Image (spheres, helix red, strand yellow):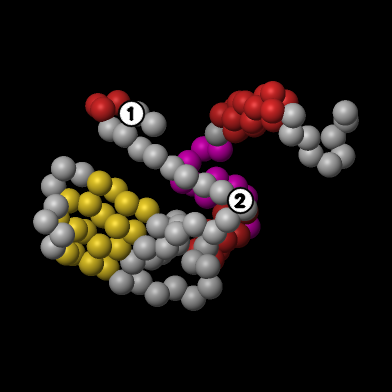
Amino acid sequence: MTHEGGAISTTLSSSRAAGPNSAAIIGTDARIEIDRVWYTPTSFRVIATDGAVLESYESRVDGRGMQYQAFGAEGAVANGDPAGGLLPLPIAESVAIMGALDEIRAQIGVRYPGEDA
């Protein structure tokens, strides 16, 4: 993918195989390598272009690390604010995304069990 200012990003995913679940952010002066599983509190290193480790952070989390999001959601719902006061719920955007996904499914012939033929 290309972004404003010429930045480039890539992603790879699979629902049939286990990948490394790591991430890297690469800049002109250094890169950040984020250990698996990158979307939970995890360890990372900042590495210079010559390979020297400039900084490192080690983290150990019990479970999958997503308990923080679950605790936050639980508190938000209990307080009557499903967005948790962080961001407004982007309902229109979510509906538009689901519409695009439905269109993709229709074009490639994917149907979920229980859907009308």
Nearer the camera: disc 1 or disc 2: 2
- State the separation of the CA atoms marked 1 and 2: 26 Å
Q: Nearer the viewer, residue 7 or 110?
A: 110
Disc 2 crowd, CA 10 A, few/some/many (<14, 14-19, 20+): few
Q: Residue furthest front?
A: 17
Magenta-colored stretch includes residue 8: no
Amino acid at dot 2: Ser
* Residue 90: image location, x then y, percent: 55, 34
Q: Is mark 2 on a helix, strand or loop?
A: loop
User: Label 1, on which residue?
Assistant: 3
Q: Earlier in the sequence, mark 1 or mark 2?
A: 1
Mark 2, residue position: 15
Instruction: Decide whether residue 86 is among the magenta residues.
Output: yes
Residue 113 point in image, percent of width and height:
84, 42
Whether residue 52 is situated above or below residue 98 in the rendered picture? below
Rendered-image quadrant of the N terminus: top left
Q: What element carries label 1?
A: loop
Q: Which residue is drawn at 85% across and 34% down?
A: 115
Task: Tell me: residue 42, above or below residue 115.
Answer: below
Quarter assignment of residue 70:
bottom right
Identity, as a three-letter code, of the amino acid under mark 1: His
Q: What stretch is highlighted in magenta?
A: 78-89
Regarding residue 54, the answer to whether it shows in the image is no
Q: In which quarter of the image is residue 28?
A: top left
Q: Is residue 113 above or below residue 23?
A: above
Residue 101 horizontal side relative to residue 49, left or right: right
